[in-house]
Amino acid sequence: MMTYRNLLGVTAIAVSIGLVTGCASNDVKSVRAIAEEAQSAAAQAQQTASEAMSSADEAKTAAQQASETANEALRVGEEANTCCIETNEKIDRAFKRSMEK
């Protein structure tokens, strides 16, 4: 037969096992919740990074187009300047001829 002392020992062991199991279960739940939060944060960070990359690509495209437009404007300006120089030279020659007469 079990004595009071044996019954008390068995009860203490059972309670200890119950507490350890309960604490372990709570720890697992806590760790799982933290892991799920971390996963969610990582997914959000990935989404934000993808959006930033897309915006950067759009900005790069716009900058390339602006650079092409600026280069075209520079070319047109240089042509206009060359034309202006040639016109001034023609006017100067015409003026010199008229002064020689």
Image: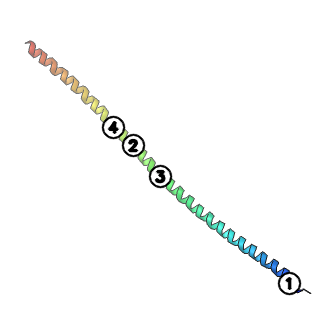
Which of the 4 image quadrants contains residue 64? top left
Q: From the image, which quarter does the C terminus lie in?
A: top left
Give the numbered dot on residue 52.
3
> Which residue of the protein is positioned furthest toward the front in this rendering?
5
Q: Amino acid at mark 2?
A: Ala
Mark count: 4
The vertical placement of 77 against 101, above or below, is below
**Mark 1 or 3, closer to the camera:** 1
* Residue corresponding to mark 4: 70
Q: State the separation of the CA atoms marked 1 and 3.
A: 67 Å
* Residue corresponding to mark 2: 63
Which of the 4 image quadrants contains residue 74? top left
> Which residue of the protein is positioned furthest toward the top in this rendering?
100
Q: Mark 4 or mark 1, which is nearer the start of the sequence?
A: 1
Residue 73 picture location, percent across and down: 30, 36
Q: Along the line of sight, which residue is nearer the eye, 23 or 55?
A: 23
Residue 52 picture location, percent across and down: 47, 52
Q: Mark 4 or mark 2, which is nearer the start of the sequence?
A: 2
Q: State the separation of the CA atoms marked 2 and 4.
A: 10 Å
